[in-house]
Structure formats: structure tokens, C-alpha cells
Amino acid sequence: MAPVTNNRSDLIHDHYDPASVPPDPEQARGRMIMATGTALALATDLATSTWHLADIPADVILHEDTFFDVENWPFAQIVIGTLSDTDALVDQTKVTENIVTPIAIGDANHGKRLWEVLGLAANPGGLISLYAHAEGNATGAGNMPFRVAYIAA
């Protein structure tokens, strides 16, 4: 019979083992914070238009409750990222779905820091500004309700 081992997740710390690393505060005991807003687009908005959505701490864990409701967004392409990396968070056509969720339970971005999800090489510290970008002219006026949910210590 094979030996039985007792292992731990990364949330459990063995205080008696000097090699054991204490759990990350956000992972183990973080609190959920939600930034909820709406971006308004005018019928006259052009392909170069941007919407500053929110400023989020770089080192928080982006949560799967983050969503962008694009049903009434007057652009065919949904592009959300930073000012310099326009599609770092979302880049998809509107016909894909009305509710865009950039984080899914158990996907490759689950449990990652905002800076990691955005594809940055290192944590820049401070706040990261999220922007929606137009890649074409507006087809009319519209809006995009959204929520950025994240876990912080």
C-alpha cells in the first residue's frame, strides 16, 4: 500500500516549519471591493474616443464578479484595457455576448493580481487606470454599466 501524505493548500501555514510560507493576505483573508459605474457614449463619438472607467490598485486580485454590460454599447468591438494597452483586459466582438466577464472561475486569470491579468511584466505599484476604447465610430448613443470586483487585504 502506498504511503498516505497530508498536504496543504497555499492558504495553510505550518508555523513549526521554517520553509513554510505564510499565506498571501489577499488570498487568505481579503475583502471584496466593488467599483460600480456606467460609461456613456454619444452618437458623435469617434474611433479614437476613450472612457476612463476606474482606477484600481495594481496588486489586488481581480474577481470573477467583474463584468461589463455591453448590450447598449454603440460599438461593434468591446475593447477594455489601459490607456497604453487598449485591449489588455477585453477584446471581443459585441455579438459574442451582452455581458463580458474577463475573469471566469478557474480560468487562467483566476486568483491573479490585476497587473498580471493585464499582462504587465511586474507590479507597477499604485493605481492602474482602466479604459474603454472605441475602435470604430459610434452607431448611436448608448451606455455600458460595469462592475470591477476585486479582493484586497
Image (tube, rainbow, N blue to C red):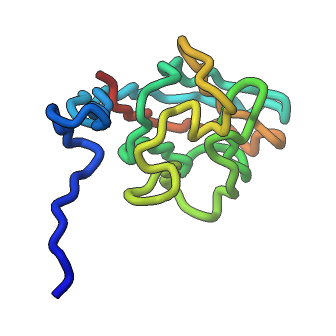
Quadrant of the snapshot with the C terminus: top left
- Percent across and percent down for residue 4 are 15, 72
Quadrant of the snapshot with the N terminus: bottom left
Towards the viewer: 86 or 141: 86
- Percent across and percent down for residue 82 are 68, 28
Q: In the picture shown, does residue 146 fall above or below 130? A: below
Towards the viewer: 125 or 66: 125
Q: How many marks?
A: 0
Decide if residue 118 is on the left or right side of residue 13.
Answer: right
Image point (49%, 21%), residue name: 56
Decide if residue 7 is on the left or right side of residue 92.
Answer: left
Quadrant in which residue 139 is drawn: top right
Image point (76%, 40%), residue name: 138
Image point (73%, 24%), residue name: 83
- Percent across and percent down for residue 78 are 67, 47
- Percent across and percent down for residue 30 are 25, 29
Question: For the view shown, which residue lies furthest in the top direction?
Answer: 126
Image point (54%, 51%), residue name: 71
Towards the viewer: 98 or 15: 15
Towards the viewer: 34 or 97: 34
